[in-house]
Image (cartoon, rainbow, N blue to C red):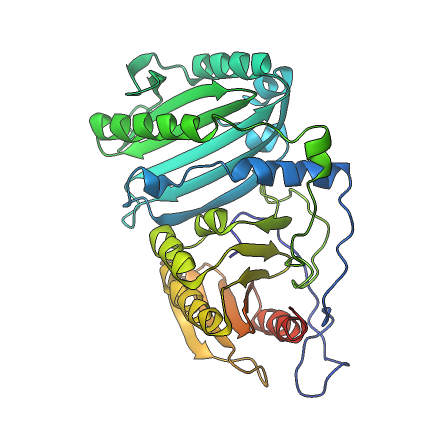
């Protein structure tokens, strides 16, 4: 699913001229050609590669299972700056790109942000970690249990929850973890265990440079070619969606990570392609139908359901819901539509119901040619 702050991609709903029954608007209706990435796009793919090493907050505590709307690559220093006015610190220390995930509890009272930043060299990473610790402004209040990473108090005076930060470098990467929790001891326990786990996950990681960088492709097993075409990636909304993901990373983008991971494992979901929609690959046709049902059910966790259980005209097995984010009556509605075909599932989200339905109609036709 598209994160709340991911790049918005425009689409122009229009009457179909390719099929009088199914109405895909102006979107492509056959698998598309995915052109080789340019230098800027290759950096996004490198950030995705780094993101495969990010921990799941639920590996630290399963109560941190709900989406906070943030997952993906962050390219510019301005967007990636973990704290206010810290972009210059990143730039002078060889910052290249980063990947961030934020999860929270169902009652919104605890939150964990995991941010991986790639630099040019291990020396840059060490200096960046040191300077970011200084920039947080808080002295060490403890250390992580295994790697003895300093934990700093970054709580804003008068705030209702505690905010603790742990920052460490591993090779040429930096892990910057922040936890908001009810008490100091709870926050320290969470961030300490999380930073140790994240450092372990980065232990044998190497940035994709040289020959490895040439192996970064914009598609894998044609999963991206089975998506509805989107515009070139940009960072207007902080995060960039481009290329493909493993099931591990995609689970971090779902409304309930614990349920998603369990479901993906059970249904054999192993690869996800990103375009204007999101395409999931399951083990079998039956598994894809079960996955569609799971994804559609997860919409209820996004906000208030305004309309449920309707379909896209003439698109067999399609399912749509309209929701409003949170309890805010002024929040604009959004439509999610899902369809399974073969072993694949398309998930589309758009501000207009017509647009979500046309994307789904196009996806249905595309997936009819998927192998």
Residue at the location (72% across, 66% down)?
A: 31
Image mark count: 0
Q: Is 356 located above or below residue 257 in the figure?
A: below
Q: 246 or 358: nearer the eye? A: 246
Instruction: Judge left or right: residue 32 versus residue 80.
Output: right
Instruction: Judge left or right: residue 360 versus residue 28.
Output: left
**How far across and down, in percent of the image, does residue 12 sit?**
71, 67
**How far across and down, in percent of the image, does residue 203 sit?**
47, 25
Q: Is 150 located above or below residue 328 in the figure?
A: above
**How far across and down, in percent of the image, does residue 233 sit?**
69, 47
Instruction: Judge left or right: residue 180 versus residue 101.
Output: left
Residue at the farthest bottom position: 20
Query: Would residue 326 be seen by someone viewing this image from the given angle?
Result: no
Query: Would residue 26 be seen by someone viewing this image from the given angle?
Result: yes
Q: 32 or 65: nearer the eye? A: 32
Instruction: Judge left or right: residue 229 versus residue 315.
Output: right
Residue at the location (52% across, 13% down)?
A: 126
Q: Which quadrant is the C terminus positioned in?
A: bottom right
Residue at the location (74% across, 63% down)?
A: 32
Quarter of image, res 192:
top left
Quarter of image, res 362:
bottom right
Residue at the location (54% across, 61% down)?
A: 280
**How far across and down, in percent of the image, does residue 251 sit?**
44, 51
Quarter of image, res 77:
top right
């Amino acid at each position: 699913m598209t994160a709340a702050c991911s790049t918005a991609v425009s689409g122009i709903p229009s009457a179909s001229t390719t099929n009088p029954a199914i109405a895909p608007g102006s979107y492509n209706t056959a698998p598309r050609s995915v052109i080789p990435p340019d230098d800027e796009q290759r950096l996004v793919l490198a950030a995705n590669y780094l993101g495969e090493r990010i921990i799941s907050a639920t590996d630290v505590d399963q109560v941190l299972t709900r989406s906070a709307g943030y997952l993906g690559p962050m390219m510019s220093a301005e967007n990636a700056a973990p704290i206010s006015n810290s972009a210059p610190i990143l730039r002078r220390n060889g910052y290249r790109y980063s990947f961030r995930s934020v999860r929270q509890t169902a009652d919104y009272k605890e939150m964990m942000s995991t941010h991986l930043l790639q630099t040019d060299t291990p020396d840059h990473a060490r200096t960046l970690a040191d300077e970011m610790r200084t920039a947080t402004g808080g002295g060490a209040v403890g250390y992580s249990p295994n790697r003895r990473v300093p934990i700093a108090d970054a709580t804003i005076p008068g705030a209702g929850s505690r905010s603790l930060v742990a920052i460490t470098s591993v090779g040429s990467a930096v892990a910057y973890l922040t936890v908001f929790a009810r008490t100091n001891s709870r926050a320290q326990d969470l961030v300490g265990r999380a930073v140790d786990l994240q450092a372990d996950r980065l232990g044998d990681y190497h940035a994709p440079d040289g020959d490895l960088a040439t192996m970064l492709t914009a598609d894998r097993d044609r999963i991206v070619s089975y998506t509805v075409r989107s515009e070139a990636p940009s960072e207007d909304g902080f995060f960039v969606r481009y290329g493909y993901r493993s099931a591990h990373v995609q689970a971090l983008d779902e409304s309930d990570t614990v349920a998603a991971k369990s479901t993906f494992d059970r249904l054999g979901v192993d690869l996800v392609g990103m375009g204007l929609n999101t395409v999931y690959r399951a083990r079998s046709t039956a598994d894809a139908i079960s996955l569609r049902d799971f994804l559609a059910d997860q919409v209820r966790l996004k906000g208030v359901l305004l309309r449920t259980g309707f379909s896209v005209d003439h698109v067999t097995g399609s399912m749509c819901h309209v929701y409003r984010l949170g309890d805010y009556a002024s929040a604009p509605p959004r439509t999610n539509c899902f369809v399974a075909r073969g072993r694949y599932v398309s998930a589309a989200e758009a501000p207009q119901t017509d647009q979500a339905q046309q994307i789904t109609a196009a996806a249905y036709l595309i997936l009819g040619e998927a192998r």
